[in-house]
Image: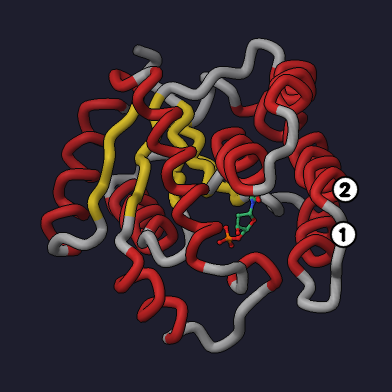
Amino acid sequence: MSKKPVIVFEGIEGSGKSHHILQVTKFLKKNKIDYIKLREPGGNLNSEKIRKLILNKNSNFNKNTDLLLYMAARSENIQLLRKHYKKKIILIDRFVDSTIAYQHYGFGVNLKLINLINNYLLKNFKINFTFLNIVNKKNMISRLKLRKSLNRYDKFNNRFYEKVQKGFLNLEKKNKKKYMIINSNLDIKHNQNKIIQTIKRLI
Ligand code: TMP
């Protein structure tokens, strides 16, 4: 495996992915290891503008518009990702699996269309490893309650998030070697340790 891997963190709301990615960046900084980190939607200035538009509580785009906006945000990141591809460790907070899980499994958008656009944008840019964070309904609800403000995608019903999480798990099943499931209902320190040990192996 490349020593400058592309590592993605995926999972539904409240699954602890942002906490874990932060711990990984702390570990890399402490060890003076170069990396870049970005989130999707978002990342660079233009993508962050698109993020605001999609996630604004007052937006009510249809599912196809949402897909195209997420892809537009990705399109704005690709140049940056390519620049650092195989030169630096790349950490991404959500990426193509989120589009398949949310837009296809959650909203029923055509999978072929999603794959077509993703392949067009990504070309030879490949993900090396994905940490898939999962959470049960009870913990998801209680963690969302702790958030100071909720965006448009934090407010769907529980059934929707169940479908999305199942979608993520389907993707994991198809390519188990490239995924690690992090059960965020378990002890957070235990998970943190498991992730850091895996990162050490990957880089
Ligand atoms: P986050 O800050 O929790 O990552 O919020 C981003 C939201 O955007 C989250 O609900 C997942 C959603 N999303 C999609 O629906 N499709 C995508 O392709 C991406 C990257 C994110």
Q: Which quadrant of the render holds ligand 1? A: bottom right
The reply to whether residue 95 is in sight is no
Residue for point 61% across, 79% down:
150
The three-letter amino acid code for the residue at tag 1 is Phe
Q: Which residue is at 87% across, 59% downward? A: 61
* Image quarter in which the N terminus is found: top left
Q: Does any portion of residue 186 appear in the rendered image?
A: yes
**Helix, strand or loop status at disc 2:** helix
Q: Residue at x 39, y 15 (%)?
A: 2
118 w.r.t. 26: above or below: above
Picture quarter with the C terminus: top left
Q: Percent from the top left, x then y, of residue 73?
A: 79, 45
Structural crowding at the residue carrying mark 2, measured as other residues with C-alpha within 10 Å and reported as few (<14), some (14–19) or many (≥20)? few
Kindly identify the amino acid type of the residue bearing the numbered disc 2. Answer: Thr
Along the viewing direction, whichever of 177 and 203 lies nearer the viewer: 177
Residue labelled with disc 2:
65
**Are dots 2 and 1 in contact, CB under 8 Å?**
yes
Residue located beneath label 1 in the image: 61
